[in-house]
């Protein structure tokens, strides 16, 4: 008991001294647990703690208490015959909040869920979720998950503390905001070759429509306003729901949208590609997914003047830029 009391006093003194050394009051957080879902073998508890440490530290307001310190105190409590309940450990170590973390992944998309619990009033808890795409590869061709893990953690933390601008003043690489997830769907091809001149883009709809989806994705993926699923990850979601043949030149089915809703996808881009006498009209529609249905938010229209794949790509990218600005 003596060792426990001495250590508690020492820790309390260290944290109190830190508080007094800064004019702004700090909020101390402690990790309660880290759970890793399926296919997260590249994510480790150590990486998660590092992400939380950086996500909290760069706010200038929150400080993460190292897990090794938490575990050392819990061990000392056990040795002194005290059951190291999490709330008691948190209170003794000077934590204001406890974070429970769940990390999950589907192909190239990471999801982080944070459950932030107040130490003094445990019924006071906020849940935040954040998503981020895995973009980078290591030299051995394995995915580098660390940047995506940090982004997703920042988004989840901002939601949990109910401050979407907590990172607004950070350096550009850390200036992250909560953002809804987005899927790029196909275009509904509308052609009438009996009346209009034939175009190769319409004659080869499987090839040109997949290219169209990729072009929209390439423009949308760097938007700070959305977290965009890449096409392989999108198709992985469909496969889980036994939707093996997705045709990008046809409008989405109700089953597709319901599948995306189950994966917490909140935005969806679709549209039409309509052949005219001398050109083709393109319409892109940004939708919100609500209860398994599409709710249009905004649309953009453009004209493709010639049967040219490169021009098709350029027009789609320019329209996408306007659509999600």
Image (tube, rainbow, N blue to C red):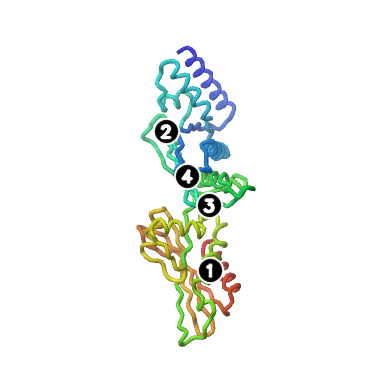
The circle on residue 118 is 2
User: Horizontal and vertical percent for residue 191?
Assistant: 46, 80
Q: Is residue 41 above or below residue 237?
A: above
Closer to viewer: mark 2 or mark 3: 3
User: Which residue is pictured at 49% across the width and 86% down the height?
Assistant: 196
Label 4 packing within 10 angstroms: few (<14), some (14-19), many (20+): many
Residue for badge 1: 212
SS at mark 3 in the image: strand
Q: Earlier in the sequence, mark 1 or mark 4?
A: 4
Residue for badge 3: 133
User: Horizontal and vertical percent for residue 24?
Assistant: 55, 32
User: Which residue is pictured at 52% across the width and 55% down the height?
Assistant: 225
The circle on residue 112 is 4
Closer to viewer: mark 2 or mark 1: 1
User: Which residue is pictured at 48% across the width and 62% down the height?
Assistant: 184
Q: Is residue 289 above or below residue 307?
A: above
SS at mark 2 in the image: strand
Quote the CA–CA distance across marks 2 and 3.
30 Å
Q: Earlier in the sequence, mark 2 or mark 1?
A: 2
User: Are the residues flagged by discs 2 and 3 in contact, CB closer than 8 Å?
Assistant: no
Residue found farthest to the right: 139
SS at mark 1 in the image: helix
Quote the CA–CA distance across marks 4 and 2.
19 Å
User: Are the residues flagged by discs 1 and 4 in contact, CB closer than 8 Å?
Assistant: no
Label 2 packing within 10 angstroms: few (<14), some (14-19), many (20+): some
Q: Is residue 114 left or right of residue 148?
A: left
Q: In front here: 27 or 106?
A: 106
């Amino acid at each position: 008991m003596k060792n426990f009391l001495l250590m508690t006093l020492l820790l309390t003194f260290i944290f109190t001294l830190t508080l007094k050394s800064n004019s702004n009051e700090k909020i101390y957080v402690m990790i309660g647990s880290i759970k890793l879902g399926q296919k997260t073998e590249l994510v480790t508890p150590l990486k998660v703690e590092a992400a939380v440490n950086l996500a909290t530290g760069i706010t200038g307001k929150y400080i993460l208490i190292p897990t090794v310190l938490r575990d050392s105190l819990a061990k000392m409590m056990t040795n002194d015959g005290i059951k190291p309940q999490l709330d008691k450990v948190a209170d003794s170590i000077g934590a204001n909040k406890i974070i429970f973390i769940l990390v999950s992944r589907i192909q190239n998309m990471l999801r982080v869920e944070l459950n932030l619990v107040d130490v003094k009033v445990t019924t006071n808890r906020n849940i935040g979720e954040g998503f981020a795409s895995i973009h980078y590869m290591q030299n051995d061709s394995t995915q580098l998950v660390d940047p995506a893990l940090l982004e997703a953690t920042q988004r989840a933390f901002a939601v949990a503390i109910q401050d979407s601008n907590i990172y607004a003043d950070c350096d550009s690489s850390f200036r992250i905001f909560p953002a809804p997830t987005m899927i790029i769907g196909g275009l509904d091809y509308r052609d009438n070759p009996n009346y209009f001149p034939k175009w190769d883009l319409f004659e080869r709809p499987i090839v040109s429509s997949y290219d169209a989806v990729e072009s929209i994705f390439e423009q949308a993926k760097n938007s700070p306003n959305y977290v965009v699923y890449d096409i392989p990850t999108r198709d992985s979601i469909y496969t889980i729901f036994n939707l093996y043949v997705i045709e990008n030149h046809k409008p989405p089915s109700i089953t597709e949208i319901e599948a995306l809703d189950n994966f917490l996808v909140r935005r969806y881009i679709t549209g039409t590609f309509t052949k005219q006498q001398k050109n083709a009209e393109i319409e892109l529609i940004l939708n919100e997914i609500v209860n398994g249905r599409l709710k249009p938010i905004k649309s953009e229209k453009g004209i493709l003047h010639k049967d040219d794949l490169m021009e098709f790509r350029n027009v789609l990218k320019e329209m996408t830029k306007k659509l999600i600005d």
